[in-house]
Image (cartoon, rainbow, N blue to C red):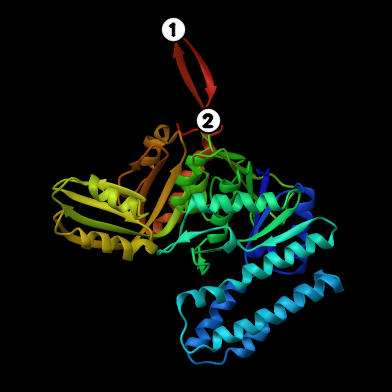
Amino acid sequence: MARGHLHKFGGSSLADADCYRRVAHILLTHGNSDDLVVVSAAGKTTNFLYKLLSLRDSGQLWQEELQVLISYQQTLIEQLLSNEQARDLRERLSTDRSQLVSLLSLQHHNEYQLNQVVSFGERWSARLMAALLRETGVAASHVDACSILVAEEGAVPNILVPESREKVQAILALHPQERLVITGFICANRHGDTLLLGRNGSDFSATLIASLADIDRVTIWTDVEGVFNADPNKINDAKLLKSMSLAEADRLARLGSPVLHSRTLQPLFNTEVSLAVRSSYASHTDFTLIAPLSSSASAPVVTNLNEVLLFSFKMNSNIAPLFEVLRAAGLTPLAYWELAQHKVELAFTLESQKQVQAVLNQYRDEWAIEELTIQSDLGLVALVSADAHHFRRSFARLLSRDAKPVYQDSLSLVTLVPQAQVSLLTQKVHRRCAESKNAHWRVVIGGGQYWRSMDRFI
């Protein structure tokens, strides 16, 4: 049973009672009676739960800190709900507190018990938001994602799509014309043990559930208006993009977008689901719509990473098998260069270092990998657009002698520069993009000529 819209709200959108009320208002004014909602833990709740585990593991007292967290949840309940609904959630919270005390008092924890502790935040959020919606007079229920998302265990849980789809469709059929508020960040193995979906897991939950539920659109409500053509925190005249293709968004996410995450986008490929990124603090403003297919390229986007790693080595065999192994492990390079004398250079994020080193060490003998070095004093600057090839010459002209040659693929231009040069080069590339909006170019046709405006480098 298909639904039309799924809304996702992160922790910053649920930080206090006013935030919850704002979210409820958004759902009532921007949604329909059968929308799905995915929520993160309120505010810094997940960090607080990790802190409890850390205190417990280091032998420090955690009971007082637990009470601070429980009081925070109690305050939200009292400020948002009437007595009848508040009573039910207070009783559940009391049960949860007892369960947390039992889990934290164990001398030894297994991984599932640790996951259970961390997962309380999302469960509290889903329960409270569903109750708040009912308070406004609309039908709403909360759903624990562990009951609908089934996964095989691994470094990151691997969702079993057919089983999960069947469970999602079944829960939709049980709740027609009712808003379902679903926990983000968590899923379960076949035995029902809680698993965590990792970094940005709630956003991933949203797009994943949307694909399983045949949703038309996902809206990720966050604390920014959408995707800009440069980081507005660093570039004063950065402009909001009203639309971009899924492929462009994915490439931008891999190259350092602070708003998008590649893993979040993956469930949308080979679907007709569109993704909107909007501000929950300014729901009336423009936003960015990411479409599965786009007939034209979006405006060029400038992005950067202040720290990247450059792996350099010699390899006497074909590099293609290495790329296949890296990609299968989710380690696609940000950019790469094949140089003379069988030398190869691969750029990766800092988070990827251990995994990349493990792959290179594993195949060192098989592929004759030699002279491996890792350079860590570089940053990345990139331009993303489906028209990237048009911009290469001008991009290259902006580079200093210390920059790596431009790496180009179908959607981006990438260079690495000393970290001290990242900010200045980013500004230069963005400025050139802005200037190009007022530029014109001349086309000669059959001896005649005319002028066209050109939203690209000249």
Q: Which mark is residue 296?
A: 2
Marks 1 and 2, the one that precedes in the sequence: 2
- Give the SS element for disc 2: loop
Q: Pointer 1 and pointer 2: residues touching (CB < 8 Å)? A: no
- In the image, residue 273 sits, relative to residue 442, either above or below, namely below
Quarter of the C terminus within the rendering: top left
Count the numbered circles shown.
Answer: 2
Nearest the viewer among 293 and 419 is 293
Q: Is residue 288 left or right of residue 281?
A: left
Task: Specify few, some or many for label 1: CA neighbours under 10 Å numbering under 14, 14-19, or 20 or more.
Answer: few
| In-image side of 317 versus 258 (left or right) | left
Answer whether residue 227 is visible to the viewer in this image: no
Where's residue 232, x and y in %?
A: 58, 53
Q: Nearer the viewer, residue 132 or 261?
A: 132
Residue identifier under label 1: 446
User: Which residue appears at 36% of the width and 46% of the height?
Assistant: 399
The quadrant in which the N terminus is found is top right
Say the numbered circle drawn on residue 169: none
Tell me the residue at 23%/56% (across/down). 312
Residue 81, x across and y down, in percent: 82, 70
Task: Quote the CA–CA distance across marks 1 and 2.
Answer: 27 Å
Nearer the camera: disc 1 or disc 2: 2
Left or right: 378, with 362 as reference point: right
Residue shown at the point (42%, 55%) measured from the top left: 422
How busy is the neighbourhood of tag 2: few (under 14 within 10 Å), some, or many (20 plus)?
Answer: few
Q: Amino acid at mark 1?
A: Gly
Residue 409 in picture, x, y percent from top left? 36, 39
